[in-house]
């Protein structure tokens, strides 16, 4: 069977913070319908890698290709974050504090000019899936860490993005939810075929989620576990 | 570079265009000569006035720094319960225009027969007027100290040593900023020395220019001030770095420092003194205005001037907020060298003396608007915007840095429309600081005289300039009435700020949570 081309391709991406070389000429490919887990010690640039893919950060060297199109070239963003069709779960969630859970979920959909009925349908589905129906009218400040994380997940999945960037997406949730989420993620990938980049510290979690695990250490991706 | 930072930089450039035109076209292009400068600056004791002004500003800024520190400490760290009532009181002197204090001095002088038109009283007045600036900046520092730093020091330090050895050294940039800004404001103050009949260098420049309209001479006289201010701003910029120092929130207070009972009484006395400073001039105004027959009759002659002042101030505030919003958005999103450029530009306008702006605007407005009255009003709005833009900018920046950058980033991933993301995400998250900056701007510009006295159109008059003109003929009931009108307006706006401060406190808690 012919292998699919990479949906995201990083070519010799390097990034420095102060004097520390965080990413050292990283070259990686991520395919549609596949989960790639990136793991490694703290401070090795896992989150930075996701931010570079999303177009929220720029590398000092190297390029990022999305769907074969050059999206980032060295320090230049050629395709805006919004146009990359990315759904991202941030480590600190980034939920808009002045909007209720409902509104946090609907903002992106409304911005994509989705009709009202579809918005409602998608939101209801997300609220059910991520078990946050009871807090749909609450503001983020009133939520627990786990609830916030589930809202952040729901917000990212609601957009049905082509690329899903998940930064420690279940670190604050209980074990039962983690298992349900892993199952949901797999079924979601079968249905929508997004390209998923999953960052986690926990190696056991990484191995449960995907067979493709990349170890990032000292700015390099030497091993594939 | 993206469009937004470019637009922000272009608007910033337009705002300070008069200053640049004056500097380059009025001076550098015509060939500045050191001989001409020295013959002007070192003749007739002008250099002595300059040095005296530095002395006056140094003393008044040192006084405001000391009082500002005590006030900020009392509110944030003393743990004295009653201090919460004073957490807004210390801001009030800033809301009272400088000329109101001078009116009180005139009244007391006439009443007691003691000559209060002296240098020490001038220094005292300047330090009272700018004490809240010091208190706000030092208060921002005392709130910003990371709790972990203090707690780890607390575990190993006897008594309050942690505060002296850890907190205060950490606060150094805030002290330097407070001192630098109060120095700049005191040096540039026009109305208080003018009404107190004390010759200062700023007053001298205005008088020289007002009498001869000689642009080149004005430039020669302003240049040393500009260089002095620039030096201070560069030094301040160097120590402050990326810290924001204009925090008006009443939120986090930090660890309580154990205080001696004597020190507590001292703090209470300080607050009583501030209360007297706030209440006394207002009471004098009421006494003076009490002889009017009917309030409407007394108010009607001045409502046009007060209304005009309000319109011009609000116009200036809107312009400043728009430019400030674009600037702060660009500044917080920028990285590396660009961020450094934005931060430096944010400090630079503090180095522009108001006389420089006013004379530059006169030079430019003649070319742009001729003698049109609407044009003159536009120039006044322009002048106010440029004058108070750095303050607006720092208030907005202080708010913007407390907002988690992830909100903006997740908005950028969710919606492609710049406008929608600004209106639905950025503005609601920064609404509190936008309102604060708006009211703050209006309060300051309603009392503005130095700039307005040169720029005010011939057929319109701002209330502050009118009060200033009338005061030269004595402190009569008309002056008291118009001043009270301004004061009522300012106090109303002040209460609105307090409301916003409370809202913002909740907002910050939500954001941090």
Image: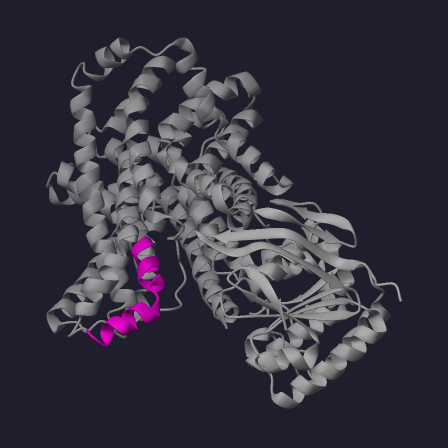
Residue drawn at point x = 70 percent, y = 74 percent: A154
Which image quarter: residue B351? top left
Q: Position of residue B143 (x, y in %)?
A: 34, 64
Of residue B344 and residue B223, the one placed in the foreground of this image is B344
The extreme bottom residue here reads A176
Q: Please, which colouring scheme is shown?
A: one colour
B376 versus B79 height, above or below: above
In the image, B106: left or right of B368? Answer: left
Residue A95 seen: no
Secondary structure mostly seen in the magenta stretch: helix
Q: Give the range drawn in magenta.
A: B137-156
B148 part of magenta stretch = yes
Residue drawn at point x = 46 percent, y = 63 percent: B499
B144 part of magenta stretch = yes
A223 versus B487 height, above or below: below
Q: In which quadrant of the rendered image does the N terminus of chain B lie?
A: top right
In the image, A202: left or right of A132? Answer: left
Q: Position of residue B392 (x, y in %)?
A: 46, 46
The extreme right residue here reads A1
Of residue B294 and residue B14, the one placed in the foreground of this image is B14
Which image quarter: residue B340? top left
Of residue B31 and residue B166, the one placed in the foreground of this image is B166
Residue A48 seen: yes
Q: Position of residue B104 (x, y in %)?
A: 24, 45
In the image, A79: left or right of B364? Answer: right
Q: Position of residue B452 (x, y in %)?
A: 41, 31
In the image, B28: left or right of A69? Answer: left
Of residue B354 and residue B477, the one placed in the foreground of this image is B354
- Count of numbered circles in the view: 0
């Amino acid at each position: 069977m012919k292998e699919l081309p990479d949906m995201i391709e990083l070519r010799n991406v390097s990034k420095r913070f102060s004097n520390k070389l965080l990413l050292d000429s990283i070259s990686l490919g991520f395919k549609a319908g596949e989960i790639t887990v990136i793991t490694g010690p703290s401070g090795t640039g896992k989150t930075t890698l996701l931010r570079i893919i999303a177009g929220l950060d720029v590398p000092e060297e190297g390029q990022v290709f999305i769907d074969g199109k050059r999206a980032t070239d060295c320090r230049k963003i050629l395709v805006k974050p919004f146009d990359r069709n990315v759904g991202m779960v941030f480590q600190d969630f980034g939920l808009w504090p002045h909007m209720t859970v409902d509104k946090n979920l609907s903002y992106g959909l409304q911005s994509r000019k989705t009709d009202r009925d579809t918005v409602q349908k998608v939101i209801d589905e997300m609220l059910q899936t991520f078990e946050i129906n009871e807090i749909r009218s609450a503001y983020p400040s009133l939520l627990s860490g786990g609830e916030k994380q589930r809202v952040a997940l729901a917000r990212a999945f609601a957009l049905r993005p082509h690329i899903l960037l998940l930064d420690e997406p279940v670190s604050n949730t209980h074990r039962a939810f983690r298992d349900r989420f892993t199952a949901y993620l797999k079924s979601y990938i079968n249905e929508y075929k997004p390209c998923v980049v999953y960052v986690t510290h926990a190696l056991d979690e990484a191995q449960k989620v995907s067979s493709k695990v990349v170890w990032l250490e000292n700015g390099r991706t030497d091993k594939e576990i | 570079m993206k469009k937004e930072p470019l637009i922000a930089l272009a608007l910033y450039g337009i705002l300070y265009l008069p200053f640049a035109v004056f500097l380059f076209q009025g001076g550098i292009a015509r060939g500045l000569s050191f001989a001409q400068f020295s013959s002007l600056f070192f003749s007739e004791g002008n250099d002595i006035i300059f040095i005296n002004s530095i002395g006056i500003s140094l003393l008044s800024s040192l006084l405001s720094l000391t009082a500002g520190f005590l006030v900020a400490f009392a509110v944030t760290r003393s743990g004295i319960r009653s201090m919460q009532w004073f957490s807004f009181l210390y801001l009030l002197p800033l809301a009272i225009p400088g000329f109101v204090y001078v009116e009180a001095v005139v009244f007391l002088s006439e009443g007691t027969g003691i000559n209060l038109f002296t240098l020490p009283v001038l220094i005292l007045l300047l330090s009272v007027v700018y004490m809240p600036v010091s208190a706000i900046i030092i208060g921002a520092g005392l709130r910003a100290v990371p709790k972990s730093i203090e707690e780890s020091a607390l575990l190993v330090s006897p008594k309050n040593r942690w505060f002296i050895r850890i907190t205060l050294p950490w606060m150094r940039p805030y002290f330097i900023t407070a001192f630098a800004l109060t120095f700049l404001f005191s040096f540039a103050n026009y109305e208080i020395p003018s009404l107190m009949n004390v010759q200062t260098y700023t007053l001298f420049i205005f008088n020289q220019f007002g009498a001869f309209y000689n642009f080149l001479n004005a430039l020669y006289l302003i240049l040393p001030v500009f260089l002095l201010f620039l030096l201070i701003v560069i030094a301040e910029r160097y120590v402050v770095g990326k810290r924001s120092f204009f925090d008006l929130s009443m939120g986090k207070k930090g660890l309580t420092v154990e205080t001696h009972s004597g020190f507590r009484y001292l703090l209470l006395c300080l607050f009583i003194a501030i209360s007297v400073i706030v209440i006394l001039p207002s009471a004098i105004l009421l006494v003076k205005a009490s002889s009017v027959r009917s309030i409407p009759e007394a108010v009607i002659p001045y409502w046009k001037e007060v209304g005009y002042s309000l319109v011009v101030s609000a116009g200036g505030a809107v312009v400043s907020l728009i430019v400030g919003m674009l600037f702060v958005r660009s500044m917080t999103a920028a990285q590396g060298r660009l961020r450094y450029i934005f931060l430096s530009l944010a400090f630079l306008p503090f180095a522009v003396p108001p006389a420089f702006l006013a004379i530059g605007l006169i030079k430019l407005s003649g070319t742009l608007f001729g003698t049109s009255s609407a044009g003159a009003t536009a120039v006044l709005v322009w002048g106010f915007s440029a004058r108070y833009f750095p303050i607006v900018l720092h208030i907005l920046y202080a708010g913007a840095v407390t907002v988690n950058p992830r909100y903006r980033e997740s908005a950028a991933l969710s919606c492609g429309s710049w406008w929608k993301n600004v209106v639905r995400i950025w503005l609601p998250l920064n609404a509190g600081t936008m309102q604060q900056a708006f009211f703050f701007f209006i309060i300051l510009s309603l009392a503005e005289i130095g700039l307005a006295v040169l720029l005010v159109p011939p057929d319109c008059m701002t209330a502050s300039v009118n009060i200033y003109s009338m005061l030269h003929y004595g402190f009569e009931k008309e002056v008291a009435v118009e001043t009270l009108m301004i004061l009522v307006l300012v106090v109303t706006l002040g209460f609105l700020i307090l409301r916003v401060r409370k809202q913002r406190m909740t907002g910050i808690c939500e954001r941090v949570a």
